[in-house]
Amino acid sequence: MLLAVVASIGSARFLPVALAVIVLFLPLRWLAMGRLSRRTWLDLPILALVALLGMTWWLSPRPDLTTPQVIRTLNGIGLYYALVNSRLSARQVAYGLIGMGLALALLAPFVVEWFPGAKLPLIPAWVYSVPKLVSDTVNPNPLATLIVVVFALGAGLIYQQKTATDKPLGSRMAWLTVVTLGLLLLNLFISQSRGGLIAFAVALFCLGFLWWRRVRWLMLALVLAASLGVWRFNLMPDLFARTAQGGPSSLQIRLIHWTRALELIKQTPLTGIGMGVYPELVDRGPRGVTGLTLVERAHSHNMLLQIALDLGVGGLAVWLLMFGLVIVMLLRCLRHPAAFVRSAAVGLIAAQMGLLAANMFDSTLWGVVRSAPFLWVTWALAAMLFNNGQWTMGNEQRTIAH
């Protein structure tokens, strides 16, 4: 199932193949294990989400656009249950994510379509002239989000490696993680993704807030003071400035998208407009947006608005419920006696906050974006940490009682 979903991320042609593998595996697991799945906190919300996906597919005015995105979401759900029910441990899945981060950092120059510009002028132009190995290249914004998620997880494990007596990483794995984090950070700055850099700053703040309890409120006060200073003295550049070609700025385009998205949500709040249909409707109506490129019109550039557009307000409520449950599970893991569980939970909390910040300005882990199933991997790891923690603490309590 994991290989099938990875293949579907590489090429949309494998989306139905991955879904078929997932569907066929369900009765095999039932026969072998006597149950469909281990229970997790996300089961009921996921069931509601699947029902909403069926609704949006049934009601969609463009099934040809909706079907691939519905399948991609179902594949992410299938990947979640594949990991939760596998023989892999949470530690092995975390190592796998770090390994994926290393592969991502090494392959990024050859598969990502860079957009060099004046955002970070210190980066030399020759960095972006590396020949591409694929024709269907990757946008740097989803890459930046993935980098932040893996970086936060790895940083959590490395910090605990330094302070804990029971090391969450072996010495070799620790060095490999350090190298991976360095390469990921380099790729993050090369991407020049402002959303990714904001997400990185949010993730670092969350890591520090969870690590250093004695100064967490001082950190929060400093961030608030710095934000007020930037606002009071107008230290930010003119975010509404037009581009060198005379077109609207990135922020202006997003504001237009958000306005249009809110209009469409008000028109169909219960059912949404259907997954994948937004590019067809963005330039219609009295406030339609014209002149956007294919990439600019792909989605509303805000994941929460996009979920509400695709599945209605109920779909957004279900997604927010799942996100909240993941955070609660991870917070409870912070009290676990094992250093690995605590450190992975810290890293994943920072990762979730970072990806949420990045997706306030983009939609990198939902719908049309190929990396959307990756979000379900982080949620599966959270569920595995929580289930493992509950089981471990239960065993300890039974042993003490005995």
Image (cartoon, grey):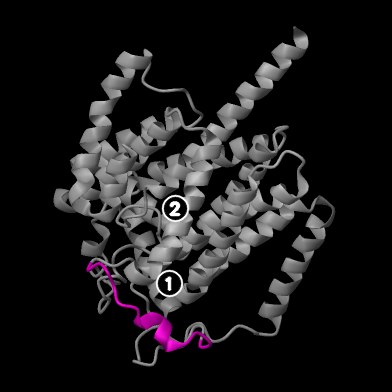
Residue 185, relative to residue 163: is it above or below? below
Q: Nearer the viewer, residue 194 or 271?
A: 194
Q: Position of residue 163 (x, y in %)?
A: 77, 48
Look at the image and tell me in which quarter the N terminus lies: top left
Q: Depth-wise, is mark 1 or mark 2 nearer the camera? A: 2
Q: Is residue 336 magenta?
A: no
Q: Which residues are magenta?
A: 121-135
Element under label 2?
A: helix
Which residue in the protein does label 1 denote?
A: 255
Q: Residue at x 50, y 84 (%)?
A: 123
Q: Residue at x 65, y 35 (%)?
A: 333
Give amino acid for label 2: Met
Which residue in the protein does label 2 denote?
A: 100
Q: Nearer the viewer, residue 228 or 18?
A: 18
Quarter residue 11 falls in: bottom left
Element under label 1?
A: helix
User: Does residue 96 appear to the left or right of 397 in the view shown?
Assistant: left
Mark 1 burial class by Cα count in 10 Å: few <14, some 14-19, many 20+: some
User: Does residue 301 appear to the left or right of 192 in the view shown?
Assistant: left
- Upstream in sequence: badge 1 or badge 2: 2
Residue 67 visible in the displayed image: no
Q: Residue at x 53, y 44 (%)?
A: 94
Give amino acid for label 1: Leu
Between the C-alphas of marks 1 and 2, the distance is 34 Å
Look at the image and tell me in which quarter the C terminus lies: top right
Q: Position of residue 51 (x, y in %)?
A: 31, 33
Residue 267, relative to residue 93: is it above or below? below
Quarter residue 371 falls in: bottom left
Q: Position of residue 161 (x, y in %)?
A: 70, 48
Q: Residue furthest top?
A: 402
Q: Position of residue 105 (x, y in %)?
A: 45, 64
Using the image, tell me which numbered label, if any, was put on residue 114.
none
